[in-house]
């Protein structure tokens, strides 16, 4: 079984898994874990789109 992902899908999967792991290992309560995981995911997505637009501007 092969998983064929484009760049955006791979980045989305990484952001989801990394956010979940960061939430699980850094916070004590379930509520803190969920809030921190969602916040990390939002920052990952903001960085993904921000860097994507920056690269688009540079390459014209």
Image (cartoon, grey):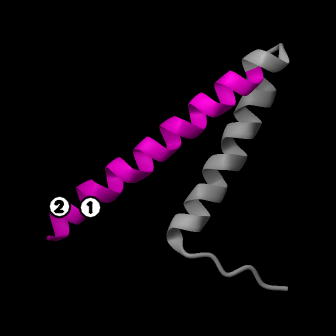
Magenta stretch containing residue 15, yes or no? no
Dot 1 alpha-carbon crowd within 10 angstroms: few under 14, some 14 to 19, many 20 or more: few
- Is the N terminus in the top left, top right, bottom left or bottom right quadrant? bottom right
| Residue at image mark 2 | 57
| Residue 54 image offset from top left, x and y in percent | 24, 54
**Foreground pick, 32 / 58:** 32
Q: Are marks 2 and 1 in contact (CB under 8 Å)?
A: yes
Q: Quadrant of residue 35?
A: top right
Write the start and end of the magenta stretch as one range. 33-60
| Residue 49 image offset from top left, x and y in percent | 38, 52
| In the image: residue 44, left or right of residue 46 | right
| Residue 52 image offset from top left, x and y in percent | 34, 58
Magenta stretch containing residue 57, yes or no? yes
| Residue at image mark 1 | 55
Residue at position x 74%, y 38% from top?
20
- Is the C terminus in the top left, top right, bottom left or bottom right quadrant? bottom left
Element under label 2? helix
| Residue 9 image offset from top left, x and y in percent | 59, 66
Element under label 1? helix
């Amino acid at each position: 079984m092969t998983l064929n992902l484009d760049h955006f899908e791979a980045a989305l999967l990484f952001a989801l898994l990394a956010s979940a792991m960061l939430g699980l290992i850094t916070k004590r309560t379930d509520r803190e874990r969920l809030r921190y995981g969602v916040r990390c995911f939002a920052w990952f997505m903001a960085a993904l789109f921000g860097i994507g637009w920056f690269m688009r501007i540079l390459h014209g």
